[in-house]
């Protein structure tokens, strides 16, 4: 079942203000305070795992309270591991959105699954997201590993708004039988149903520890990453078939001139025919992608943006590990 898209971002207070933006650093990073904490402070990594299209990114954005992960109805939207940090005086939760688990068909997907494996290794709490239509994780080996890890695990049955109460109750009983030690709960990530009580249970499951990140940080990713993700989201929206899965976006330049930010981004495609499709007749398609992406980037950084997009053929980049490493997939 395709993941439901969230509404377009509404105008809001810019996430970056009153300090210079360094595109090599996390966009909301301020001077680092000492990582001290009161007695009884809890902190940990709460990592979100699940099949493609079950709503992991929608859940991540709801839990963090802002739109960090891109959302699209197409499968395999998330390619990287994205951390979102939520703070309280007595706790810190480091959420991680991860790619949907799958059996890799090429090197890019191997890199994506490496992020999933790392998320399993460093988790303090696991959120396993399924939906009312799914009977098993897309990758049985990942599910087998989860059941043997002994971590606090929440199996979250998403999209319950698409089924009736009887279906939701049947799914809860089914997943409780699959993993008796887990906490099983129906949710709607899109509508925020049952997420307040989920937060309370997550905090209770965290180990006592000082914060891992300064309390004023929101994410571990730099601004360039989010700019590239916004452009890639528009590619997912405007193109069909294999095109979105054959594209990678690389931000080549990011110049903050005060009132205006000038960004140059390159869209890598695998074949010449794909380049022609991405550009479109008389450049109409690439212009549409650029216009939509620029609007969202301006909301993100709170400044006017000049966005220059260009397309380059990078043959078979999805199966070239050295190139994928440069794109951040095998770090």
Image (spheres, helix red, strand yellow):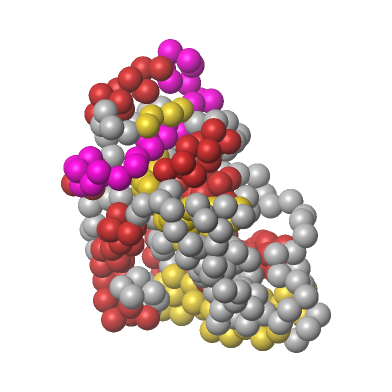
Q: In this view, does 156 lie to the left or right of 292?
A: left
Q: Residue furthest front?
A: 39
Q: Which residue is drawn at 74% across and 64% down?
A: 14
Q: Is residue 191 left or right of residue 291?
A: left
| Residue 101 is at least partly visible in this image | yes
Q: Quadrant of residue 301?
A: bottom right
Q: Position of residue 101 (x, y in %)?
A: 30, 50
Q: Where is residue 170 in the image (x, y as percent from the top left)?
A: 36, 17
Q: Where is residue 156 in the image (x, y as percent from the top left)?
A: 42, 35
Q: Which of 154 and 263 is in front in this view?
A: 154
Q: In which quarter of the image is the N terminus?
A: top left
Q: Where is residue 173 in the image (x, y as percent from the top left)?
A: 33, 20
Q: Quadrant of residue 29?
A: bottom right
Magenta-tinted stretch: 144-168
| Residue 282 is at least partly visible in this image | no
In the image, residue 169 sits, relative to residue 33, either above or below, namely above
Count of marks placed on residues: 0
Q: In which quarter of the image is the C terminus?
A: bottom left
Q: Residue at x 32, y 33 (%)?
A: 182
Q: Is residue 206 left or right of residue 234?
A: left
Q: Residue furthest top?
A: 166
Residue 320 magenta-drawn?
A: no
Q: Nearer the viewer, residue 253 or 286?
A: 253
In the image, residue 111 sits, relative to residue 264, either above or below, namely above
Residue 145 magenta-drawn?
A: yes
């Amino acid at each position: 079942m395709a993941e439901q898209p969230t509404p377009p971002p509404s105008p809001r207070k810019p996430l970056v203000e009153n300090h210079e933006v360094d595109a090599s650093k996390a966009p909301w990073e301020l001077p680092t305070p000492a990582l001290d904490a009161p007695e009884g402070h809890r902190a940990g990594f709460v990592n979100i795992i699940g099949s493609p299209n079950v709503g992991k990114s929608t859940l991540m954005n709801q839990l963090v309270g802002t739109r960090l992960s891109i959302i699209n109805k197409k499968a395999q939207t998330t390619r990287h591991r994205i951390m979102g940090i939520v703070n309280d005086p007595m706790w810190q939760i480091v959420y991680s959105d991860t790619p949907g688990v799958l059996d890799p068909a090429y090197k890019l997907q191997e890199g994506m699954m490496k992020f999933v494996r790392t998320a399993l290794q460093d988790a303090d709490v696991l959120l396993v997201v399924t939906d009312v239509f799914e009977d098993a994780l897309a990758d049985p080996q990942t599910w087998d590993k989860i059941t043997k890890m002994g971590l606090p695990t929440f199996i979250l049955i998403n999209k319950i708004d698409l089924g009736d109460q009887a279906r939701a109750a049947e799914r809860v009983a089914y997943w409780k039988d699959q993993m008796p030690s887990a906490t099983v709960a129906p949710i709607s990530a899109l509508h925020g149903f049952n997420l307040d009580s989920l937060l309370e249970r997550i905090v209770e499951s965290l180990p006592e520890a000082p914060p891992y990140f300064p309390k004023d940080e929101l994410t571990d990713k730099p601004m360039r990453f989010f700019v590239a993700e916004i452009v890639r989201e528009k590619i997912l929206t405007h193109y069909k078939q294999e095109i979105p899965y054959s594209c990678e976006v690389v931000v080549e330049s990011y110049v903050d001139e005060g009132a205006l930010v000038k960004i140059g981004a390159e869209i890598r495609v695998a074949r010449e025919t794909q380049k022609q499709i991405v550009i479109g007749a008389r450049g109409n398609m690439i212009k549409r992608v650029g216009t939509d992406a620029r609007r969202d980037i301006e909301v993100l950084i709170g400044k006017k943006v000049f966005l220059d997009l260009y397309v380059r053929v990078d043959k078979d980049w999805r199966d070239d590990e050295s190139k994928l490493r440069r794109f951040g997939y095998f770090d």
